[in-house]
Amino acid sequence: MDAPVPSLDVAPSPHVSAGGLTTASMMREVMIGLLPVCGFAVYRFGPGVLLRLLLAMGLCIGFEALFMGMRGRVSAIRDGSAALTGLIFALTLPPTVPLFVIAVGSLVSIGLGKVVFGGLGQNIFNPAMVGRAFVTAAFPASMSAAAFVPDGMSGATPLTLARAGETLPLVDLTTGHCWGSMGEVSAVACLLGGGYLMWRGAMGWQIPLAVLATSVLFGVFRHGVDPTAPWGWTHELMAGGLCFGAFFIATDPVSSPVSHSGRLMYGSGVAILTWFFRSFSGYPEGFMFAVLLMNAATPLINQLHVTRPVGGHV
Amino acid sequence: MKSLILHVWHQSGLLLATGFFFGLTLGVAQVWLEPRIQANRLSETLDRIPDLVPGAVSGRASGREFEALDAEGLVCGTVTRAGGGGFGGPIELLLGWKGQELTGVYILAQNETPGLGTRITDPDWLKSFAGCQRGTACVLNEDVDGWTGATISSKAVVDAVNTALIPEVGHE
Amino acid sequence: MSESSLPTPGERFVNGVLPENPVFRQLLGLCPVLAVTATLASALTMSFAVAVVLLGANVVVSLIRGWLRPHLRIVVFTLTIAGFVTLVDKTMAAFLYPMSKELGPYLPLIIVNCIIICRCEVCASKQGVGAAAADALGQSLGFTLALCAIASVRELLGAGTLLGFQVMPAAWPEWVVMILPPGAFFTFGLLMALLSVIQLHREHRRVV
């Protein structure tokens, strides 16, 4: 057998040590960042949420152990990425989602979203969103707009209301007094968690900023086209999964571009596609599809934004 | 000249022969099978007539429409075809009429999303169209409920029924 | 190539089933594989139609192989295949009307199914009627097995039924996506992976 090839990352100087930021510590930071979101979800929708979040995390770890065990790499579960995938996947589901939806979604997230590509770092698409897209298509009755509002309650999700030309008070959207998936309802909790991640340096600021800024731009544009609509750019920002997605979904380091300028482009792409899906598609929310499509475009973006060595050609 | 004919035959004789053989076979098959195929197409509609027009037991084609016949063989209603564009492709409908009143709707063909758009084939939902009068449009979510998650499919059926209810609108 | 160096009829038959399976090994005829495998009944009907056309075309091409002109052979193949497909399509419309309506355009589309023209080219235009017929039967069996495998998974998960009979408990949540086109891609890819894993295991065992 040949001698092992040393792993070399070629990058222009100056080089600074990563400060001990490993995969495992990064996943831990993101989970701490998700605590306000999870806490608010339990407060808003009751203890059933806790059960669903824990189930998704447990199943994702279990499937990862099973599939990576088939490849002889059980230790891969120690980095905590499977648990995080499960947590993010569960947070994008309706609060009363049936448990089998979580089981199937976890299986698809880990199996088809991650392990078939070779495990963490090899996957093209965000695993949590692959699972979410699969269950959205597989179980329309459990995942349609009506499923977000528990039986016996009146109301609709903010984006469904927007389709009907109605709106909710901005303060309700911001503080989470509306229907929606477990993680997305409170924009404040998302900002809190996202702020923590940026402070800790576990996440770059480029993608969230690009997503939020582009959304504001398109919200203003929509308002300019139809000034009488009750739906302003603030609603565009606060309703649905935009805040949650901008901080916790689009920032997945594996499936997003490498360079800073590439990340800005990626974030804007996600926001523009989300706006198009929200405005013209059959679904009220489009963040998931936007992220998956931009994941597919990530290799292209990486090619466009190759870091130039100082003083040399590419 | 003679060598040219020989050359052509040498090159394409097999093609001509197989072409002739299959042409003949298909011609025979067409003559033999076509009446049966036509009868199948017709009975697909005629079999539905007892469900579409109350009191009817059989039916017969009459021009572009179909006449519903009761037990005594008298005409007791008509059945027409209607169509519209759904979410996944064209939707074909059969409509039963008694005078000016719509008595039944049947989805002959559709290609909607399974589990969502396919709810338009639900017999109980289709029954809610019965009672509409020619000349008065049927309104979605008032006369007929729409299906959650299948708004486009529900609307397609309602639109197709309306083109039949108000022919003037349909011809515009 | 002399006829003696080509596979025997027995080998032709066996090869078609798994070693040279048209769907999982040659990746041919994928249009029906993806389009008509939502239910087991339509998959079986499609397999039967393809088998009839393949057998007919292979036998006819093998019979006339002595008169084939190399530059006109594809035209003759296409003519033969189109003749048989039209016959099958008309017969189905006459005797199996509901199924013919469900399969819709995919029955006439058998004309452009690469499996058939591939077998005419590879086997029937070079070997005798016996080998051509055995080849057609083997390939059809392989095609049928592949279609039925995919359709069973899709119908079972997507509708909880097999051939229209309820198999799963009544509370089975239908996986609608399996009936939709993406379900065909998922099932096809996973089954192909499974076959490759099995083959790897067998080769591994043979070496050890």
Image (cartoon, coloured by chain):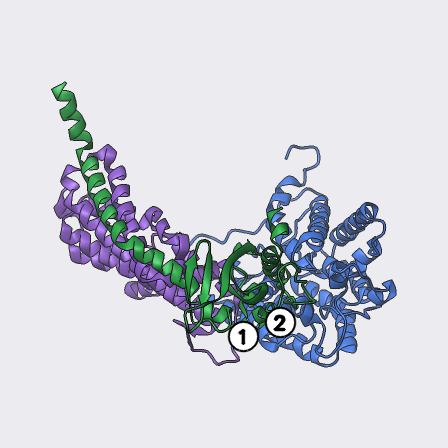
Q: Secondary structure at mark 2?
A: helix
Q: Which mark is residue A41?
A: none
**Which of A111 and B104 lies nearest the eye of the viewer?**
B104
Q: Which mark is residue C173?
A: 1
Q: Colour of chain A?
A: blue
Query: Which chain identifier belongs to the green chain?
Result: B
Res A68 visible = yes
The residue at 82%/71% (across/down) is: A177
**Which of C130 and B61 lies nearest the eye of the viewer?**
B61
Q: Chain of mark 1?
A: C
Numbered circles on residues, count: 2
Circles 1 and 2, Cβ within 8 Å, touching? The answer is yes
Q: Amino acid at mark 2?
A: Ser
Q: Residues within 10 Å of mark 1 (few under 14, many from 20)?
A: some
Evaluate whether label 1 is on the same chain as label 2: no
Q: Position of residue C112 (x, y in %)?
A: 35, 46
The residue at 15%/37% (across/down) is: C67
Q: Colour of chain C?
A: purple
Q: Secondary structure at mark 1?
A: loop
The residue at 28%/55% (across/down) is: B33
> Which residue is denoted by mark 2 in the rendering?
A142
Q: Chain of mark 2?
A: A
Q: Position of residue A141 (x, y in %)?
A: 61, 70
Quarter-of-image position of residue C133:
bottom left
Q: Indicate left or right for C107 with C17 as reference.
A: right
Q: Position of residue A187 (x, y in %)?
A: 80, 64
Q: Indicate left or right for C62 with A45 as reference.
A: left
Give the quarter of the figure containing the C terminus of chain C.
Answer: bottom left
The residue at 13%/25% (across/down) is: B6
Res C20 visible = no
**Which of A7 and B81 lies nearest the eye of the viewer?**
B81
Q: Amino acid at mark 1?
A: Pro
